[in-house]
């Protein structure tokens, strides 16, 4: 009696999708590699730290805190959005059992929008500091 197949599914266009004799390889759950959560985790942590810097140190007028918060919010989160996109495309091309997660890109876009709104608070501190310095010169 031949062994039973587990009903594995091959992604379209995978190199092993048509074997001689019409037999498909069995896909085990441990073979499937989902997209990485690292860009989302970094983006959420960056947004949290930036919000903390924006609202806890709001009255300090510390230029360094404002610049760090400004770099953390839009730049790092948008960079992570690009990293996620590149990683998913490279993994999709090189790993036959890769499971893409398009929702990750959507979440990163929403985080990017939130980071641009949060960046306003850091920009206002930088602008206030620069206006004070220019007022002293003029």
Image: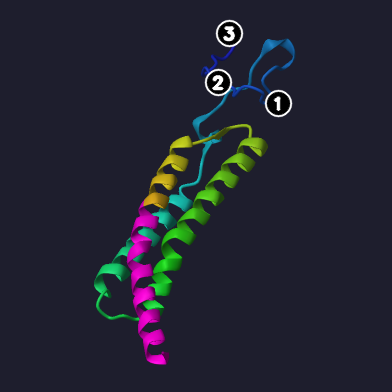
Q: Residue at x 54, y 14 (%)?
A: 4
Q: Residue furthest top?
A: 1
Residue 59: give x, y in percent of width and height: 24, 78
The quadrant the N terminus occupies is top right
Give the class, few, some or many, for how many residues have Cα within 10 Å of label 1's Cα (few <14, many ≥20): few
Spatial separation of the CA atoms under disc 1 and disc 2: 13 Å
Left or right: 86 with respect to 102?
right
Q: Quadrant of residue 46?
A: bottom left
Nearer the N terminus, badge 2 or badge 3? Answer: 3
Relative to 133, does residue 58 appear above or below in the rendering? above
Q: Do the residues labelled 2 and 3 touch (CB within 8 Å)?
A: no
The residue singled out by tag 3 in the image is: 1
Residue 8 appears in the figure: yes
Q: Which residue is drawn at 52% across and 17% down?
A: 7
Left or right: 63 with respect to 102?
left
Nearer the N terminus, badge 1 or badge 2? Answer: 2
């Amino acid at each position: 009696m031949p062994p039973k197949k587990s009903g594995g599914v091959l992604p379209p266009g995978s190199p092993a999708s048509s074997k001689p004799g019409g037999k498909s390889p069995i896909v085990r759950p441990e073979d499937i590699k989902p997209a990485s959560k690292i860009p989302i985790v970094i983006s959420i942590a960056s947004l949290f730290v930036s919000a903390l810097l924006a609202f806890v140190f709001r009255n300090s007028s510390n230029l360094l805190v404002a610049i760090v918060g400004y770099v953390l919010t839009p730049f790092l989160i948008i960079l992570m959005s690009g990293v996620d996109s590149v990683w998913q495309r490279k993994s999709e091309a090189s790993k036959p059992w890769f499971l893409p997660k398009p929702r990750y890109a959507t979440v990163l876009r929403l985080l990017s929008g939130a980071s641009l709104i949060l960046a306003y608070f850091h920009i206002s501190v930088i602008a206030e500091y620069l206006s004070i310095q220019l007022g002293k010169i003029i």
